[in-house]
Amino acid sequence: MTAMTLPRIALPRIPLLDRLAIPAAALFLLIALVGPWLAPHDPYQVDLSQALQAPGPGHWLGTDAAGRDILSRLLAGARTTVLSSIVVVVFAAVVGIVVAALAAIGGRWADEILMRVCDIFLSIPGMILALGIAAALGPSLRSTIIALVVALWPPFARLVRAVLRETMASTYVESARVMGVPARRLMARHVLPNSLDSLYVQAALDVSGVIVLMSGLSFLGVGAQPPSADWGAMVADGREFVTTAWWVATVPGIAITLTAVVFGLFGDALRSKLDPTLGDA
Amino acid sequence: MRSDLLTADGLTKRYGRFTAIEDVSFTLRAGEVLGLVGESGSGKSTTVRCLVGLTKPDAGTVSYDGEPLQGRAAWHRFRREAQMVFQDPYASLNPRMTVAEIVGEGLRVHGIERTAAGRRARVTTLLGQVGLDAGDLDRYPRSFSGGQRQRIAIARAIAVEPRVLICDEPVSALDVSVQAQVVNVLRDMGRELGLSILFIAHDLAVVRYLCDRLVVLDQGRIAEQGTREQIYDNPQAPYTRSLLAAVPIPDPAAERERRHRQKESAR
Ligand SMILES: Nc1ncnc2c1ncn2[C@@H]1O[C@H](COP(=O)(O)OP(=O)(O)O)[C@@H](O)[C@H]1O
Ligand SMILES: [Mg+2]
């Protein structure tokens, strides 16, 4: 469903990758949490005498035009990039779930309104919508987060709706209805808990896409502002030196790709872990 | 005469151009066990779904205790007083709730036992009644066999002290070896609690010793209805006879006797 809004990195399924994906995602998350403290140098320390140093001892991943250590900036930026992406997905998912659940309880009219609102949002490509909102709110990390949540909740709500409908048709939900379980409890105790597995998978996959979108927005200048270490902005900074100092743009570019791939694989691994239990025989 | 408890009047349900049931009318009387019998696909489940409000019939009405089943108050009362046991016990129990929660839910939502401790005590008793034990309270449905799950479903249904129990082929999904046990649990509970039971089955064997009266459904229409004696000893509709002919009789002597009688009557 999010195919239309989110970039999706498709990789062949390799069993070993499946097994590595969960620890790898955990490792990336850990780096995002403690990254700033691992930095060997001050990521914001300008030192023009050290400008554009190639990767080597002292600066393992080189330095940028202001002489700042790229490895340190990468570690500091992991927090902005990875954690903000997770925040975006969590908010989009919560809004999507709440809206879809209310529509399901509210009956045909509520459902109709939800679907129309989703259609309106979905008719605009996610990146364009997010770009417009972020620009309108004024470029900052917060604007990017808000913009992405606004762009992402409709497809999520749409997915949640489909999943909820499937669960609502199950026999245990029907038996609860026959017994007179009220709509709100039905949703909270029967429908939602049995629908969450598919939603976790989608959320994990979405994190991967949001990392790319988020970096894209920063790259275009509407995301986190200088001097904060943001991967998308770091790629943008390195653009002019691509031919002379390739590492300035390439290193954060690789970090973005690698992180997106790891979270994509994590989503896939989660799916294959959860799927057999969905039937719960 | 026993009073009418649950009445279907002219129920009709179409799926597109296909008519699943047409003009189905019958009455479950207080205290009786009524069998609804027909081959697979004859419209038994559709009839039940219309009765309990899971499907909206295209025509026809349902009355409960002499009143048409309409409006909030009537449905609210019906939701407590009529309970159901579904065919597939692998699908009818929420996989994320424990036995205590599943069986106790009705007690909770109908305000019968408002405290968790009270519900636990009641559920323990109920489990005992259906042949499970208190050690099963905190386990999830996945750790039970089909027969045990159906007992859990029965305990859930009788927990709220209903007047009507609707069982949609409650043993067809079970191993033959446990079918009789589960039918016995249902029969005993029914007697003990003075329940009126609508028992659905796809053949006449299971319901033979259970039902006071029978309704025979053939391709969505009622072929015949009558008392057990009328249906088994003197079936009128050809469809009923073919259903009866398919029933194996476990006692060889009785089986020989029956074949003999069938030959006689054919002559
Ligand atoms: N939701 C539905 N959509 C379309 N056809 C249905 C639906 N439910 C039941 N039917 C059809 O109605 C007929 C009766 O089904 P059902 O009431 O389940 O029969 P039974 O319970 O006697 O086996 C079948 O032919 C079945 O395919
Ligand atoms: Mg059926």
Image (tube, grey):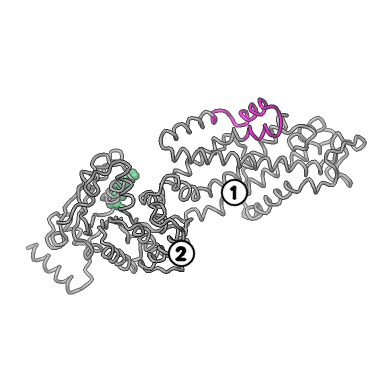
Task: Find out whether the residues at labels 1 and 2 contact each other: C-beta distance under 8 Å.
Answer: no
The residue labelled by disc 2 is B137
Residue that appears at 81% across and 43% down: A72
Name the secondary structure under disc 1.
helix
Residue that appears at 73% across and 33% down: A224
Host chain of mark 2 = B
Mark 1 and mark 2 on one chain: no
Q: Residue B25's spot in the image, x, y percent?
A: 20, 47
Q: Is residue B223 above or below residue A106?
A: below
Q: Residue A201's spot in the image, x, y percent?
A: 57, 47
Q: Is residue A146 above or below residue A281?
A: above
The residue labelled by disc 1 is A268
Q: Nearer the viewer, mark 1 or mark 2?
A: 2
Magenta range is: A121-148
Name the secondary structure under disc 2.
loop
Q: Is residue A133 magenta?
A: yes
Residue B55, image quadrant: top left
Host chain of mark 1 = A
Q: Is residue A3 above or below residue A277?
A: above
Question: Between residues A2 and B128, which one lies in front from this camera angle?
Answer: B128
Q: Is residue B117 magenta?
A: no
